[in-house]
Structures are given as structure tokens and as C-alpha cells.
Amino acid sequence: MSNQHKLKILREDELQKRVAVVLGTRPGIVMLSPIIRELERRNLEYFVVHTGQHYSPNMDRQFFEDLKLPDPHYKFEHVQHCQYHGEQTAEMLKGCEQVFLKEKPKIVLVGGDANTNLAGALAARKLHIRVGHIEAGERSYDWRMPEEHNRVLIDHISDFLFTTNEKGRQNLEKDGVLGQIFITGNPIVDAAYQNLEIAEETSCILENLGLGTHNYFVLTLHREENVDIRERLEGVLKGLQAVGSQFQIPIIFPTHPRTFRRLQEFNLLEKAETIKYLRIHKAIGYLDFLKLLAHAQLVFTDSGGVQQESCILHVPCVTLRDNTEWTETLEIGANTLAGTDPEQIVAGAEGMLQASRTWHNPFGDGQAAKRIVDVIEKELRR
């Protein structure tokens, strides 16, 4: 048979009344945990595809155990060895396509802006399976960021666009997307509330690190535009050195494996280890991190997810980026942009330490998963 005759799409009458949930990064697992719980609660037929994008499988496996989630039905083991965006996305696209051809889901859900989500959405779109994009409509307008490419592309090939708030809806309408738009809130709020309750009961991270409440700062750093460029990484270290000298408060730094490797490659690890008040630790589990964040006086981060979580938990945030897709955190005074300039990092800390912590959470009321699954369940029954 010729290759032309092997090309495959799925007809409407072939699709089964089941949902595919595609994830592959730790933030994705966290975001989608309330969705999985809601699908379970309603006894809807679903399966989870873990693309394996995260290259430290033990760490994200720990997420499933800590969050009491069922193991993924499919896991792509080989993706962790891919080095480049195109290679990684292509392997995940291939894997998702094979799974979808076998399972024939009626809807594929993706959440966020990682390569995983683009691969899952594109595989579904090519097979004529409906795509639901959770956290749709977010924009940083920074085309240096692979996440910005991904989120725009996913929005334009999705059938159901679940936005955090009115800002997301406006962005989607301005972009002229074809799918249906639903303002649902963000399930990261559901996740923060649900998972912090588990963390407070099970985590001993504060005791293990000898910390109290609101007497330390937290630092996370992992984005490639920061850690893969020596000058920017060094700028962050200089900024944190100045912060430590000025405030004389421990800065807890659970180090992402990628960041630790770059510190070694750039010969900056020894310098980082000698910075007074900066305490470098191996990466910690999600529940430990959530508890650590919830009781911090201040957080420095380049993570979109941590910007959201700190806002939800009313912890002032200094973002080590030149822009953010979460502009609402800036507008309500929960966050400030410092980039990687040492003076701006210190100024950001000074300003955010005076924040009132009384801002209104702009990401929703913790009922996003229910609203999203309402739409999905209605579509399954259509």
C-alpha cells in the first residue's frame, strides 16, 4: 500500500466518549491534577498521556505519588534524551498520534504552554479530534520565549479555550481564534488550595531546614533565557548577593537540575556556594515546595507557575524576567519585574517587602476544574 493511502484521520463515528489528558512537565501535572480528580469524581472515561518531557522522571513520578494521582496510562520513556525543541516536540507528537489512533478519544485536553501541550494539541488536530486548551489566551508578547510560540499556536488550533479571566478572552478575540471561549478561572488555584492542604499535613520541610514562618526568602530559577546565558545567570547571583547583604535573611534555593548544570558549566557554582545567606539545596518535591513557598516572606522566580502560586498564597514576588504573561499580578501589586539586573533585583525586593498581602486573587475561586469538566462532559454527551 502506498504511503498516501496510509495517511489517517479519525472520523466522527470512530471517536469514543473518552478524554485524553496530556501532560509531561511538573507544572502541567500540578495544573491538571484538579481536572483528573474531577474526571474521576464524575466517573467519566479518560486516560492520561505522560509525554516524558521532564528529564528527571523520579521527580515528576514523586508528584503523582504525593498528589495521590493514578499512574499515567501511557508514558514516553525516550523523550527525556532529546536535546532540542524540534526533536523533543517531534517525538512527543509521534507518540501522541500513536496513542490517539489506538484510543480514539473524543477530546484531548492540554494545559499551559510547554512543548508537551503543542505536541498533544497538534496530534489531535491532525486526527480531527477536538482540542481543549486550559490556560488559553495568556500572552507575554516576547517571541524569544518558546512558551510564547507554543501558547499562540495551541490557541489557534483549539476547539475549546478555557481562559483564566477576562484578559485572556480579550487576547483570544484580538487574535481571531476560531474555537469557543470559556472564562473558567485557572485550575492552578484549585491545585494550590487542594495541594497545600495535603502539604500542611505531610511536609516537614520547614523543620528539616530549620526555618520558621516568614523569616526566609525563596529563589527558583530555570528558564533557558536566564540560565543558558552566563551574563544573565551571573546577574541574578550578584543581585542575590546584594539582597543577602542588605536583608541578612536566608535565601532558600532549591536548584533545578538544568540550573545546577549551567552553574557548573559556567564555573559559577563555587561563587554561588560562597554567597552569604544563599542556601543551595537539591530540587525538592512539589508538596515541600508549596509549603516552603506558602510560609516565605518573599519569593524570587522566573517561573510562570510560581508567580501564580505566590499570588494565590499572598506571598510577594520578584520576577527575574523582563516581562510576564501574568500581567494581572503586576497590576494588583503582588509582583514586580526585575529582570536579571542586580540593582533592579534589590529594588524589587525592597518594594515587595512593603506589599500589603491583601490583594484579590485574579486567577479564580478554586472552581475552575468543575467549570472545565462541565463543558467537557456536555461535549461527550453531544
Image (cartoon, rainbow, N blue to C red):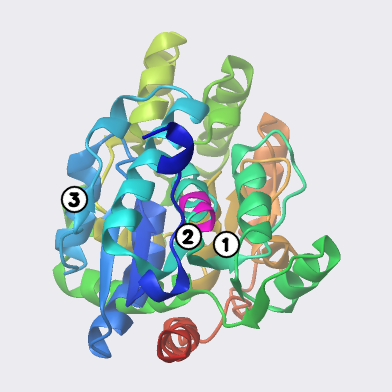
Q: Residue 23's x, y, as percent?
A: 36, 55
**First in residue order: circle 3 vs circle 2:** 3
91 up-or-down from 352: above or below: above
From the viewer's perspective, is 171 left or right of 341?
A: right
Q: Residue 270's x, y, as percent?
A: 37, 13
Q: Are marks 2 and 1 in contact (CB under 8 Å)?
A: yes
* Label 3 vs label 1, nearer the camera: 3
Q: The residue under label 3 is which amino acid type?
A: Arg
* CA distance separating discs 2 and 1: 7 Å
114 up-or-down from 177: above or below: above
The circle drawn on residue 316 is 1
* CA distance separating discs 3 and 2: 29 Å
The circle drawn on residue 61 is 3
301 up-or-down from 37: above or below: above
Q: The residue under label 2 is which amino acid type?
A: Gln
- Residue visible at 29% across and 42% down in the picture: 52
- Is disc 2 placed on a helix, strand or loop? loop
- Residue visible at 44% across and 66% down in the picture: 109
> Is residue 253 visible in the rendered structure shown here?
no
**First in residue order: circle 3 vs circle 1:** 3
Q: Do the residues labelled 3 and 1 touch (CB within 8 Å)?
A: no
- Residue visible at 20% across and 58% down in the picture: 72
Of 129 and 350, the residue lying toward us: 129
To which quarter of the image does residue 192 belong? bottom left
From the viewer's perspective, is 58 left or right of 350?
A: left
Q: Main secondary structure of the magenta part?
A: helix
**First in residue order: circle 2 vs circle 1:** 2
Q: Residues within 10 Å of mark 1 (few under 14, many from 20)?
A: many
Q: What residue does disc 2 label?
A: 297
To which quarter of the image does residue 92 belong? top left
Q: Where, quadrant-wise, is the N terminus in this rendering?
A: top left
- Residue span colored magenta: 122-126
